[in-house]
Amino acid sequence: MTSSVQRKRVRKSPDDRRAEIVGAAATVALTEGLECITLRRIAEQLDVRPGLISHYFPAVEDLVAEAFGSAATAELETLLPADPHEGSPLRHLARFFAHATGPAYDDMSRLWLNARHLSRYRPVLSERVLAQEALWRGRLSGVIETGVRQGEFRTEDADVTALQILVVIDGLAGHANTGLGGHPAAVIGLAASTAERELGLPPGTLAAPPAEAPDAPATPPDTPAAPPAEA
Amino acid sequence: MTSSVQRKRVRKSPDDRRAEIVGAAATVALTEGLECITLRRIAEQLDVRPGLISHYFPAVEDLVAEAFGSAATAELETLLPADPHEGSPLRHLARFFAHATGPAYDDMSRLWLNARHLSRYRPVLSERVLAQEALWRGRLSGVIETGVRQGEFRTEDADVTALQILVVIDGLAGHANTGLGGHPAAVIGLAASTAERELGLPPGTLAAPPAEAPDAPATPPDTPAAPPAEA
DNA sequence: TTGCTTATTGGTCGCACACTCAATAGCATC
DNA sequence: GATGCTATTGAGTGTGCGACCAATAAGCAA
């Protein structure tokens, strides 16, 4: 029994409902993976019938892409805000590395990994991934350019440097499912040290403080049961 | 019509058949992806009935792990042979980077990406990935240590350096499905330049020659139809 | 040639999935 | 309070998947 014996319909405006669906899908994407975005799964989460999801997204693939875009955009906003209220570019970068290489970023690491792989089979997701890549790179590139203009950084091509940094972060993210906790600091810090080298900074400038909570649970690589359901 | 109307049974020794199955699965893994390793798909490729695959691998997950292990081991053997017949460690590394960042490595990039993601849901695959990581890291670490002993390289911890290099390669591999061709040389060469920095080599020492075939097809990110079959 | 072991088949079951569509019931408007 | 629009449901279709198992035949040994 899901709840009541007789379903009580809740009728919402298409815009609201659509946003709700995308939100739920984004949550599922982050916590369970993109292949867990199924009509049934999302419908269940919102306590509606699967057909309704189909109504808003005739092809699930579109919802998957939308969910990824939504989650990635939200994460980028907290990672590298468009309008930095305070702090120098250098402090922004330091915060960026601290977050992007910490356990709080694990879900996002998994999502990027997930999306990159699934792009092999899902053209519209592939497009979304490329768009998000451009977005992230642009945002990071902007921070770097500001830093260069203010004399904090030194690089020939801010955009290339941004991509290099993101590549290293992606490389670390790839280990999110197979235990990343065992890596020595010199490896976790590879993103920051790469940035330092490429931006002409002294080693350690961008290094994160020894972690905010030294006894953090570390997010063990637990295997979440069933998902890519027999297919 | 697959062939004849009446099936002609071919009876092989368990060892042979098993090897044949793993081989077919490894091929499918490399060309189409690990989620395309299904009882029906492998059986079709070998022209046997699906039940036979089940007989040798009661749980498909085991076959998937085996297939990955097989493909990865084979690749490692051509990438970093256990017994290098000729050339210095430096030349070995240069060859390694040339291959691992070239289009010939694209399938393997996709496979690693695939396996890393799928490890989220498949415990036994996860184990295999960890084992292969150790194998690859050990092999690379060996080359580095030899180089250090011969005075070609300089590093504090060969094993950490090896991991750092592999992380960067993983980062680049992540882009295999979403078009890697558009990246500038400074990004493709990030693996080599990272190695040069970590090994105390002058920049460019490990850089690959401008590609062997300048007009290579470049392997466009074609989307191979159907695979993670609606699930 | 006969017999036996067992590799291989064929068929079946249950499940989860995306997708379709006529019928239904909120709810804003009149 | 009645009406109309449409968001939502319920039921159904077809597909592909892993897993299971009794029946069959290949090929070796006696």
Image (cartoon, coloured by chain):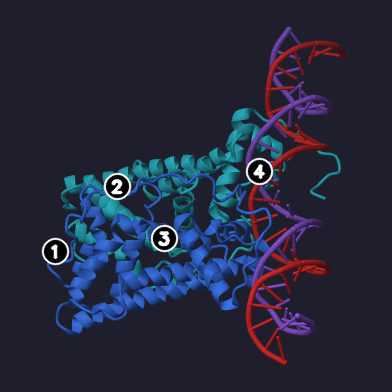
Chain colours: A cyan, B blue, C purple, D red
Quick check: can you spot residue A49?
no
Kindly identify which chain the residue marked by label 3 belongs to. A
| SS of the residue under disc 4 | helix
Quick check: can you spot residue B48?
yes
First in residue order: circle 3 vs circle 4: 4
The quarter of the picture where residue A175 lies is bottom left
Identified by mark 3, the residue type is Ala
Q: Which mark is residue B203?
A: 1
Task: Tell me where residue B152 appears, x and y as whole percent.
Answer: 15, 78
Name the residue that disc number 4 marks. A39
Q: CA distance from mark 2 to mark 1?
A: 28 Å
Task: Tell me where residue B231 appears, x and y as whole percent.
Answer: 61, 50
Name the residue that disc number 2 marks. B217
Name the residue that disc number 3 marks. A173
Identified by mark 1, the residue type is Pro
Q: Nearer the viewer, mark 1 or mark 3?
A: 1
